């Protein structure tokens, strides 16, 4: 896949997550996906991760601020905002790297680099 196609996969992932469509991950994440930072495996691991966030921050929203693709990897910097059920605001910055093979994420790294509440 081209670099632009790989970046489009990341953008689609974020757009659908912002809509609460976790089912999109079945088509974008390989069954053997692994994210060692958060110990996430496969689409179900990623869905559980997002479900946890959605349970705390029902209005969570991710915005891609910068995106770079090289080879089979896509690096993206994003702003993550949300409001907890107690009314506490979250404003965070995350840096993530995904390795994409044949249109699906097979590995991921990264996490929050700045978080304020």
Image (cartoon, grey):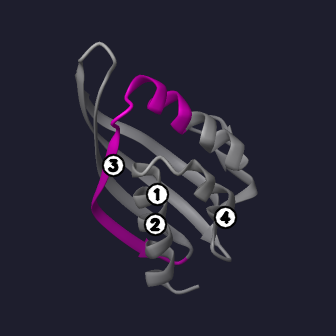
Q: Nearer the viewer, residue 20 or 111?
A: 20
Q: Which mark is residue 46?
A: none
Instruction: Quote the CA–CA distance across marks 1 and 3.
Output: 10 Å
Q: Tell me if residue 57 can be seen.
A: yes
Q: Which residue position holds label 3?
A: 62
Q: Which residue position holds label 4?
A: 27
The location of residue 68, given as percent across then percent down, is: 36, 70
Instruction: Quote the CA–CA distance across marks 3 and 4.
Output: 20 Å
Mark 2–mark 1 contact, CB under 8 Å? yes
Q: Nearer the viewer, residue 37 or 43?
A: 43
Instruction: Quote the CA–CA distance across marks 1 and 4.
Output: 12 Å
Q: Dot 3 surroundings within 10 Å: few (below 14), some, or many (20 or more)?
A: some
Q: Is residue 26 left or right of residue 77?
A: right
Mark 1–mark 3 contact, CB under 8 Å? no
Mark 3–mark 2 contact, CB under 8 Å? no
Residue shown at the point (37%, 59%) measured from the top left: 76
The location of residue 109, given as percent across then percent down, is: 52, 48
User: Splitting the image into 4 quarters, where does residue 4 fall?
Assistant: bottom left
Q: Is residue 102 above or below residue 92?
A: below
Q: Which residue position holds label 2?
A: 12
Q: Answer with mark 1 or mark 4, whichever residue precedes in sequence.
A: 1
Which residues are the magenta region? 50-71
Q: Dot 1 surroundings within 10 Å: few (below 14), some, or many (20 or more)?
A: some
Q: Nearer the viewer, residue 111 or 63?
A: 63
Q: Residue furthest right?
A: 32
Q: Residue furthest top?
A: 86
Residue shown at the point (27%, 63%) measured from the top left: 66
The location of residue 16, given as percent across then percent down, is: 46, 57
Q: Is residue 98 left or right of residue 93?
A: right
Q: Which residue position holds label 1?
A: 16
Question: Tag 3, which secondary structure?
Answer: strand
Residue shown at the point (29%, 12%) measured from the top left: 86
């Amino acid at each position: 896949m081209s670099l632009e196609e790989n970046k489009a996969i990341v953008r689609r992932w974020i757009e659908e997550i912002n809509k609460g469509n976790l089912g999109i991950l079945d088509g974008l994440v390989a069954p053997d996906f692994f994210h060692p930072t958060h110990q996430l495996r496969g689409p179900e691991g990623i869905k559980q991760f997002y479900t946890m966030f959605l349970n705390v921050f029902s209005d969570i929203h991710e915005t891609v601020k910068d995106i770079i693709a090289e080879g089979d990897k896509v690096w993206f910097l994003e702003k993550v905002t949300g409001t907890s059920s107690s009314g506490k605001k979250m404003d965070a910055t995350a840096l993530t790297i995904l390795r994409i093979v044949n249109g699906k994420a097979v590995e991921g790294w990264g996490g929050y680099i700045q978080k304020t509440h």
